[in-house]
Amino acid sequence: MTDTATETLSVVIERDLAHPAEKIWRALTQPHLMAEWLMKTDFEPQKDGGFSFQAEWGSVECRVLEIEANRTLAYSWDANGLKSVVTWTLTPTGAGTHLRMEQAGFRPDQPQFLGGARAGWPRFFDNLEHVLAKAA
């Protein structure tokens, strides 16, 4: 039996992209590129490093939890009472890279955060694809 008081929910977005993992990795980890598709940030790609995202609605405080170049990036996501973890996984394919993002840790009593993530992440992925298409 699941204890609904401690149960959490996730948002998962997956896309096959016609770009090598190294190019996608740069877009996931270089602040000037992250600002183009996600939010302004002072991100530094180092384990346990703290950073934040800045948007017109406020900021998100984060900490790098896991990092393996061109393969995996995970960071905490703490904003307005939401404490979650965002994990990016890059898997090379014959035609490019399979990119998977999971944001985990939404509590059932936080439907506004879950709904926001379900609406927002697909738009961020669209923005990411535009950045990748124009990047040299």
Image (cartoon, rainbow, N blue to C red):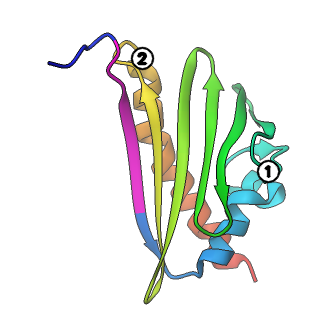
- In the figure, is residue 73 to the left or right of 60? left
Where residue 74 appears, as percent x and y from the top left, is 60, 47
**Majority secondary structure of magenta residues:** strand
| Vertical arrangement, residue 16 with respect to residue 106, above or below | below
Q: Which residue is mark 2?
A: 110
The amino acid pointed to by label 1 is Gln
Q: Which residue is mark 1?
A: 46
For the N terminus, the quadrant is top left
Where residue 9 appears, as percent x and y from the top left, is 35, 30
Q: Could you tell me which residue is drawn at 57 percent across and 68 percent down?
A: 129
Q: What is the quadrant of residue 33 in the picture? A: bottom right
Q: Nearer the viewer, residue 69 or 105?
A: 69
| Vertical arrangement, residue 41 with respect to residue 20, above or below | above
Q: Earlier in the sequence, mark 2 or mark 1?
A: 1
Where residue 52 appears, as percent x and y from the top left, is 77, 35
Q: Nearer the viewer, mark 2 or mark 1?
A: 1
**Are the two marked residues, 2 and 1, in contact with CB atoms closer than 8 angstroms?**
no
Spatial distance from mark 2 to mark 1, Cα to Cα?
30 Å
Q: Is residue 102 magenta?
A: no
Where residue 100 appears, as percent x and y from the top left, is 45, 59
| Vertical arrangement, residue 3 with respect to residue 124, above or below | above
Q: Could you tell me which residue is drawn at 78 percent across and 54 percent down?
A: 45
Q: Is residue 7 magenta?
A: yes
Q: Could you tell me which residue is drawn at 39 percent across and 19 percent down?
A: 107
Q: Residues within 10 Å of mark 1 (few under 14, many from 20)?
A: few
Q: What is the quadrant of residue 133 in the picture? A: bottom right
